[in-house]
Image (spheres, grey):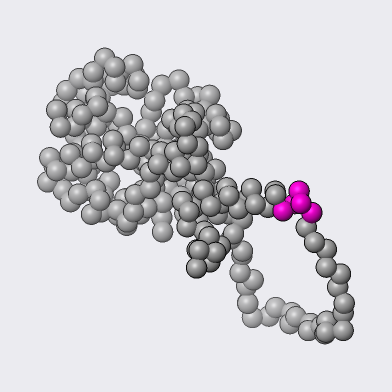
């Protein structure tokens, strides 16, 4: 499944009281790798940003004056997102604005368009309970360079979140094994008989067992408690 890391900037905090989207940034991942097939739109919201929002994103009314209305690019956006897993930090906020814009423009809902929504804030809270889990905090904790983030921007934040997501789910990579190709013309493998071979059994040390269990705990957290060995033990 394609994965789209998405972020938005808005005129304020509440779409139900008239606040609108002013920017959306999307970064595509395929097989957990950046493809460069990204998408970014600025919108003319038809209203000014609140002072608080302006301090966050710094996108002026003058800059947005000649930008398209959301409805003018809604179909292109929906086509880009169709069927994808969408990864968002604090998803209810962004989805609330997207659903409102789609409703106003008479388009299908966001959740009916995408294949799945993953909220990295929920993931981070499960992995780092009691700690700060803002995007900046996660960048610092995971070693993602966010030095260029003096102001919020939807595309920049989506790019940072893509890196954060890869780090949060890095345990999955260790479980991936590349299949050996079976192309015609490959040299046949040699069959060896190891039945008479006696191999020594070297047991893990106590320190190695402890380190192994720590790795399993991290993988269990990264998968949201859905690891196979836990279900087998429970059974």
Type of secondary structure dominating the magenta stretch: helix
Quarter placement of the N terminus: bottom left
Give the image location of residue 229, x and y in percent: 56, 62
The residue lying toward the viewer, choosing from 26 and 200, is: 200
Q: What stretch of residues is rendered in magenta?
A: 205-209
Q: How many marks?
A: 0
Is residue 2 depicted above or below 140 in this figure?
below
Query: Residue 120, percent across and down?
Result: 42, 42
Q: Residue at x 41, y 38 (%)?
A: 121
Residue 123 relative to residue 93: left or right = right
Q: Is residue 215 left or right of residue 136?
A: right
Q: Nearer the viewer, residue 85 or 46?
A: 85
The image quarter containing residue 202 is bottom right
Q: Residue at x 45, y 20 (%)?
A: 150
Magenta stretch encompasses residue 70: no
> In the displayed structure, would residue 173 be above or below residue 102?
below
Q: Nearer the viewer, residue 85 or 148?
A: 85
Residue 40 is situated, as x and y percent measured from the top left of the image, at 34, 37
* Residue 62 appears in the picture as rendered: no
Residue 212 shows up from this direction:
yes
Residue 9, image x, y percentages: 31, 30
- Which residue: 61% across, 64% down? 177
Residue that appears at 44% across and 38% down:
125
Please say if 67 is above or below 92. Answer: above
């Amino acid at each position: 499944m394609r994965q789209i890391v998405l972020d938005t900037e808005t005129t304020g905090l509440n779409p139900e009281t008239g606040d609108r989207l002013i920017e959306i940034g999307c970064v595509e991942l395929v097989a957990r790798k950046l493809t460069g097939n990204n998408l970014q739109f600025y919108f003319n919201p038809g209203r000014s940003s609140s002072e608080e929002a302006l301090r966050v994103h710094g996108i002026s009314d003058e800059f947005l004056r000649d930008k398209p209305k959301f409805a003018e690019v809604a179909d292109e956006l929906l086509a880009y997102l169709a069927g994808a897993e969408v990864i968002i930090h604090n998803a209810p906020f962004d989805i609330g604005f997207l659903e409102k814009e789609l409703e106003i423009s008479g388009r299908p809902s966001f959740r009916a368009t995408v294949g799945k929504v993953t909220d990295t804030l929920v993931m981070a809270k499960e992995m780092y309970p009691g700690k700060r889990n803002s995007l900046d905090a996660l960048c610092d904790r995971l070693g993602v360079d966010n030095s260029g983030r003096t102001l919020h921007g939807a595309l920049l934040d989506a790019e940072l979140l893509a890196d954060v997501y890869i780090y949060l789910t890095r345990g999955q990579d260790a479980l991936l094994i590349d299949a050996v190709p079976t192309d015609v013309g490959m040299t046949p493998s040699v069959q060896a008989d190891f039945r008479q071979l006696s191999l020594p059994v070297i047991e893990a040390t106590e320190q190695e067992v402890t380190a192994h269990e720590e790795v399993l705990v991290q993988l269990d957290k990264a998968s949201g408690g859905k690891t196979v060995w836990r279900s087998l033990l429970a059974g």
